Structures are given as structure tokens and as C-alpha cells.
Image (tube, rainbow, N blue to C red):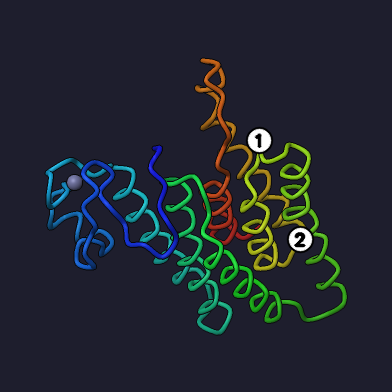
Amino acid sequence: MTKKKKLGKRSVCLSCGYQLRWYDNIPIISWLVLGGKCRKCGKKIGVTEILSEVLFGLAFLAISLKMELGVEMGLTLILVGVLGYLAIYDGKWGELPVVQLIVAVIIGALIFGVKVRSWEDFGGALIGVGILAGIYYLLYFFSREKLVGGGDWILGLAIALAVADWWAALWVLFLANAMGTFYALPAAIKKKQKKIHFGPFLVAAYIVVILIGF
Ligand SMILES: [Zn+2]
């Protein structure tokens, strides 16, 4: 996908450039109403998009069933919503919008505040931030954005703050890298190596860690 989208602009059809109206952009429902096609040119809209929307719907449902009703659950669901948006955006456009990244970090910090109850918690949570945000930052810094994009470490920071635990952070790191490598392997074998966008994998790994509860 070569077309870039300016921040703040509404989604457009990648085929004809038709600017989607709000009613064309309702998750799942619009896709079903339009039969998975662009309203204007009839070009099929990717199955990936509807699949990711359905998956996020299911993740939302599973998290609300798994977590206890309360502030942490409310904040976590908001964070998963923002992260879902970021993951889909990253998968589609290969970049992460800054405003939503900052919102994710702020919500992550609020969850951190709710979860951390002692100095011991605080220490473990800080190590988690070092593991997740730190490693992605170093990869970004030393690979000069060739391996990891600039937004990935900020996304890692938001998630590390939200899990607020070094063991959970380690699992997010492991799962995201395992999924990213698995996904990138076929292209790497064919020597069509390209930058991996870790965003969607980081978000998926975070959801798995919430649901399994490491
Ligand atoms: Zn179109």
C-alpha cells in the first residue's frame, strides 16, 4: 500500500479515493450493509479489515467477561479500543498516528496508577517498562528505524504501563516477537525482506496476556 493518509482525514477507498462517509465506516455493520464493497467503485474491501474488526469485538467481549467490574476494567477496555484502532491503522498504513499513541500512553499510566499498590509493585512495573519500551526503543534507535518503527516503542510503553508487571511485560515481548517473526518469515525466505510493523503484534500479544493472565 503506497498511498499515505494525512492525519485527521477520513478514510478513503484505496481503489478510487472515495472518501468514506461516517455511515460507511461503522465497524462490521457497514461492511455487511455494503457487502464488503466500496459504495462508489464496487471494489472489494479487504477481508483483513472485517476480520480484525470481528476479532476486536470478540476481544472486547472476552475481556469484559474475564475482568472484574471496576475502574481497571473500564480503563482496560478503553485502552484496548484505542490500541485496536492503532493496530488496524498500522496494519493498513504502516504508521502509527501520534495523538492516539499519546492517548494510549495516558490511559496506560492511569491503569499503572490503579494497579501499583506497593513499592514492590512499583519496582516490578518499572522493570516491565524497561523490558518492553526499552528494548523496542533500543531496536528503533540502533537500527535507525530499519527494524522497528518509531511508534512501536511508544506503543510498547503504553502496554508496559498497563500490564504494570515485569513478567507480563516479558510475555508481551515474547509473544509479539514470535508472531511478528512467524508473519515475516515467508517474505524473509523469499528475500523480500521488509520492515516488520510490530504494532498489530504488540496489541495482539497484550490482549492474549490480559486473557490468559500471566
Ligand atoms: Zn472505491
Q: Nearer the viewer, residue 159 or 21?
A: 21
* Dot 2 crowding, Cα within 10 Å, few <14, some 14–19, many 20+: many
Q: Quadrant of residue 60?
A: bottom left
Q: CA distance from mark 1 to mark 2?
A: 22 Å
Q: Secondary structure at mark 1?
A: loop
Image vertical order of residue 113 relative to residue 35, above or below? below
Establish if 186 lies above or below 182: above
Question: Residue, x 57% and y 68% (percent of image)?
Answer: 104
Mark 1 touches mark 2? (CB < 8 Å): no
Residue at 55 percent across and 31 percent down: it is 182
Which residue occupies the foreground of this view, 164 or 101? 101
Identify the residue at the far bottom of this view: 70
Q: Is mark 1 within 8 Å of ligand 1?
A: no
Q: Residue 58: image x %, image y %?
A: 37, 59
**Residue at numbered disc 2:** 129
Q: Quadrant of the C terminus?
A: bottom right
In the picture, the disc for residue 146 is 1
Q: Could you tell me which residue is drawn at 63 percent across and 74 percent down?
A: 106
Q: The residue under label 2 is which amino acid type?
A: Val
User: Which quarter shows the N terminus?
Assistant: top left
Q: Which residue is at 42% across, 47% downward? A: 4
The mark closer to the camera, 1 or 2, is 1
